[in-house]
Image: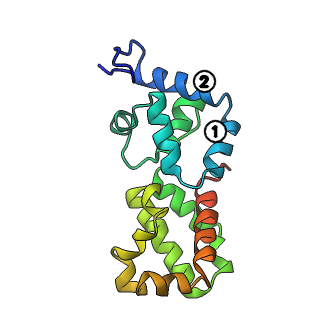
C-alpha cells in the first residue's frame, strides 16, 4: 500500500499513479525529453517529480535497480522500452562520441560512463565525483582532471554533452 503526498492511500497501481502524474505534467514523450535534456541537474527534476507525488524509491524497487529513473519514467508513462544504465553507457561508447577529446580526457569520460552505469546520473553531475575512486588513482586531482579538458567550463560542457548522448532516443 502506497500513500500520496497528502497521506491518502493510492487506489491505483504504482505504475498507473506514476503515469497519471507524469502525463499530467508532460503530455508527450517529447515534452518530457525536452525538460530532461535542458535541465542542468537531473537531480532537480527527480526532486520535482517527488514533490508531485512520484514515489521514486518505490519505482526503483519495483523495477530493476540497474535501470535509470529516466527509463522507468519513459517506460511507465510513454511505453518506451527501458535500457539499463550499462546499455546506455555502452551505446554512447559505440557511437564514437569521444573522438573529439584528447586521449586522457576520453579516458576520464569513459570512467565517468562506467560510474554512471554503476551508480546513476546524480554522481556524474557533481564535481565531487572526481575525488572518489577510480579518478584520483588513475587521473590525479580534480584540477588536473579538469585541465585535461582545457578549463572547468569545458569540462562541464563535456559532461552536458555526455548526458545528451546518454539520453539520446534513437
Q: Which mark is residue 61?
A: none
Residue linked to disc 2: 24
Let me know if residue 83 appears in the view. no
Instruction: State which tag comes first along the sequence, 2 or 1.
Output: 2
Residue 19 on image: x %, y % = 53, 25
Please state if 157 lies on the left or on the right of 84 as rendered: right
Nearer-the-camera pick, 5 or 60: 5
Dividing the picture into quarters, in which one does residue 22 lie?
Answer: top right
Callout 2 touching callout 1 (CB < 8 Å): no
Residue linked to disc 1: 32
Nearer-the-camera pick, 31 or 76: 31
Please state if 39 lies on the left or on the right of 115 as rendered: right
User: 120 above or below 76?
Assistant: below
Residue 93 on image: x %, y % = 57, 68
Q: Which residue is pictured at 42% across the width and 61% down the height?
A: 123
Disc 1 is placed on an element classified as helix
Residue 100 on image: x %, y % = 68, 79
Q: CA distance from mark 2 to mark 1?
A: 11 Å
Q: How many marks?
A: 2
Nearer-the-camera pick, 82 or 6: 6
Q: Which residue is pictured at 60% across the width and 31% down the height?
A: 78
Q: Which residue is pictured at 64% across the width and 51% down the height?
A: 37
Residue at far top of view: 11
Nearer-the-camera pick, 31 or 61: 31
User: 87 above or below 80?
Assistant: below
Q: Quadrant of the N terminus?
A: top left
Disc 2 is placed on an element classified as helix
User: 22 above or below 71?
Assistant: above
Q: Which residue is pictured at 48% across the width and 43% down the height?
A: 46
Within 10 Å of the Cα at label 1, are there few (<14), some (14-19), or many (20+) other Cα atoms?
some
Residue 168 on image: x %, y % = 65, 53
Amino acid at each position: 500500500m502506497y500513500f500520496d503526498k497528502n497521506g491518502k492511500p493510492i487506489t491505483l497501481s504504482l505504475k498507473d499513479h506514476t503515469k497519471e502524474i507524469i502525463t499530467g505534467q508532460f503530455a508527450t514523450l517529447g515534452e518530457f525529453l525536452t525538460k530532461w535534456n535542458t535541465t542542468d541537474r537531473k537531480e532537480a527534476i527527480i526532486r520535482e517529480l517527488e514533490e508531485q507525488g512520484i514515489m521514486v524509491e518505490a519505482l526503483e524497487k519495483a523495477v530493476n535497480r540497474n535501470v535509470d529513473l529516466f527509463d522507468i519514467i519513459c517506460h511507465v508513462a510513454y511505453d518506451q522500452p527501458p535500457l539499463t544504465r550499462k546499455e546506455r553507457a555502452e551505446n554512447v561508447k559505440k557511437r564514437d562520441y569521444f573522438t573529439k577529446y584528447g586521449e586522457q580526457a576520453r579516458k576520464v569520460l569513459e570512467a565517468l560512463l562506467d560510474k554512471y552505469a554503476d551508480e546513476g546520473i546524480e554522481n556524474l553531475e557533481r564535481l565531487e565525483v572526481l575525488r572518489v575512486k577510480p579518478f584520483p588513482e588513475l587521473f590525479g586531482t580534480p584540477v588536473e582532471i579538469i585541465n585535461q579538458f582545457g578549463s572547468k567550463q569545458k569540462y562541464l560542457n563535456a559532461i552536458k554533452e555526455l548526458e545528451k548522448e546518454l539520453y539520446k532516443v534513437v
